[in-house]
Amino acid sequence: MKQTCLLALLIFSIAGCAQAQTGNDGAARLKITALEESWYQAFKAKDTKAVDSILDERVLLVNDDGSVQTKGEFLAAMKYMFSQPVAQQQHVRPESLEIKVFGTTVVAIGVMLVEGVEHGKTYRRRERFLDTWKYKDGSWLIIGTEATPILH
Amino acid sequence: MKLYLLTRIGVLFLAGTATAILGAQEKDQNIAGPKILALERAWNLAESAGDLKALDALFDNELIYVDVDGSLMNKTQFLAHMKSTHPQQVITELMTVQVFDDTAIVNGSYRSNELKNGKPIVRRGRFTDTWVYKNFTWVCITAQATPILE
């Protein structure tokens, strides 16, 4: 009898843990979806402070031309771009987003439409982006990000 | 019986503590960093040799792979792609790893020597790989490559 009770308790505990994990995954999924949206809104609103708050200090950002920037370089480039006339600025519109949870690490993958002017010529391209988020000291931060032009 | 139970609990506790300590060490930058760089090198060798079994072991089943042309693949698709293409020589030019507890990000650049329409071409690219510590081992969960425009 005791053994049966212990077994039942164990099964319930495992089921409870699995449920809690699924619940956490769901919460993380919602949180990262909201943070991705806030990143887009911050970019649109030219709010470098908000972008600053979601990037980890050690993050390296790989741009669509294969160049790489530290957080400081990226924020400086953002500020410079926003100091230019609107016609010269880059505009970004997200098309899709998928979230995958790996414990306390979450991957956001999607497609965005990027429009702008480069060397006097306008461009419009679709890019695949992948952001890696990590839960650190009570908040989610981007620890890795890269964008690749979609060539077909 | 009580003594037996207490001994078992004690052994389990010690085993748990030892596992936790070893796990914590595995996630330390100084220990995990070189280990992950070695795994990256193993990946290059496996890709050059067309060793799908070795590649399979390096990737998590939920792998997300973004190829240099922006196409998206899962693990099965990536391994099938590797099987159908000629093994290519990939030379890593630069590679850094940053460990964030049970997650590590590898950034680097590479040069690949390929054949296109029978002609040898050299491509350069930048990559970001994400590794997570799972079931006492590091596995790659994402990999993305972007061409370097020169």
Image (cartoon, coloured by chain):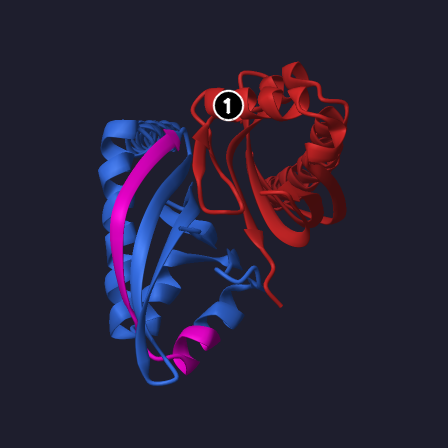
Chain colours: A red, B blue
Residue B96 belongs to magenta span: yes
Q: Residue at x 45, y 46 (%)?
A: A66
Is B61 situated above or below A22? below
Residue, far front: A120
Question: Which of these two is toward me, B12 or A55?
Answer: A55
Q: Residue at x 37, y 31 (%)?
A: B99
Would you identify the image quadrant in which residue A77 lies? top right
Left or right relative to B73: residue A46: right
Q: Chain of mark 1?
A: A
What's drawn in magenta, residue-wise? Answer: B80-99
Element at badge 1?
loop
Q: Residue at x 54, y 46 (%)?
A: A64
Q: Amino acid at mark 1?
A: Asp
Percent of width and height locating residue B84: 42, 82
Is B147 situated above or below A22? below
Question: Which of these two is toward me, B99 or B10?
Answer: B99
Question: Which of these two is toward me, A15 or B56?
Answer: B56
Q: Is residue A142 visible?
A: yes
Q: Residue at x 74, y 34 (%)?
A: A87
Is A93 situated above or below B115? above
Percent of width and height locating residue A70: 44, 27
Percent of width and height locating residue B109: 33, 48
Left or right relative to B136: residue A86: right
Residue B144 belongs to magenta span: no
Label 1 CA crowd tier, 10 Å (few <14, some 14–19, many 20+): some
Left or right relative to A46: residue B142: left
Residue, far bottom: B118
Percent of width and height locating residue B91: 24, 58
Residue picked out by circle 1: A56
